[in-house]
Image (cartoon, rainbow, N blue to C red):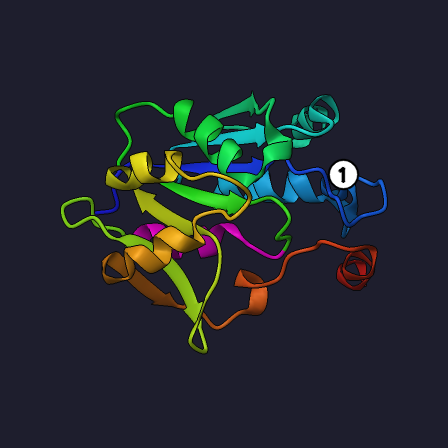
Amino acid sequence: MSGRVAALVLAAGASSRMQGRNKLLCEIGGVTMIERAVRCAVESACSQVVVVTGWQAERVEAALQAVPAPKLVTAVRNPQYATGLSSSLRCGLAALPDTLDAALVQLADMPWIEAAHIDRLIDAFDPRRPAIVAPWRDGRRGQPVLWPKDFFPALGALSGDTGARGLLERYAGSVRAVPFDTEAIFQDVDTPDELAQAQK
């Protein structure tokens, strides 16, 4: 029993370490990073996908047209994206229906996350005993993280660019760790060098 889970794909950042390029529009294996992220969310067991855009929103949203969408995919714009990740979380959460049991927060710059990884987290979620579900490897927590709806107010109250790390520490007793055997849960792309490595 996994309940109704939405994917919340955060894609609003300004790629500040990419020397002017939007990393989400860069291709890895012939596919843009934003398309890779949204495609795996669409192909997962998530009931719907919300993509939060911000910097170069029109270009990022145009790239979404390449994603086959057999389920609901919604793009919402964060006009305050420059203030940090927390504002994108608030935008995304505000777009979710009340009927959901949880939201899986996915970072769009992690190109090796697959639908199967998302499904492992959803499979570990029980809405009757809702826990935060996070991937772990070698004693480290990775991404994405599934948040039950009971935690939505706390997520919405975050500020700045810290994301939800502090909440995970505060609610450590409510976290269900799911073991993974892949580095994909840690690997993101922030710099031209990291992009070059990923493109190899």
Give the x, y percent position of residue 129.
Answer: 15, 50
Categorize mark 1 by other alpha carbons within 10 Å: few (<14), some (14-19), many (20+).
some
Residue at screen point 26% across, 26% down = 99
Give the x, y percent position of residue 123.
Answer: 31, 53
Q: Nearer the viewer, residue 170 or 124?
A: 170
Q: Is residue 42 visible?
A: no
Does the magenta-highlighted stretch encompass residue 24? no
Q: Would you say the magenta stretch is mainly helix, strand or loop? A: helix
Give the x, y percent position of residue 22.
Answer: 77, 39
Kind of residue at badge 1 = Leu
Give the x, y percent position of residue 132.
Answer: 30, 52
Does the magenta-highlighted stretch encompass residue 120? yes
Residue at screen point 61% across, 31% down = 81
Residue at screen point 37% across, 48% down = 146
In the rendered image, the residue lying farthest to the left is: 128
Left or right: 189 in relation to 161:
right
Q: Which residue is mark 1?
A: 25
Left or right: 149 in relation to 165:
left
Which residues are drawn in magenta? 112-123
In the rendered image, the residue lying farthest to the bottom is: 138
Residue at screen point 56% across, 63% down = 186
Left or right: 59 in relation to 45:
right
Q: Is residue 82 above or below residue 75?
A: below
Q: Is residue 117 visible?
A: yes
Q: Secondary structure at mark 1?
A: helix
Quadrant of the snapshot with the C terminus: bottom right
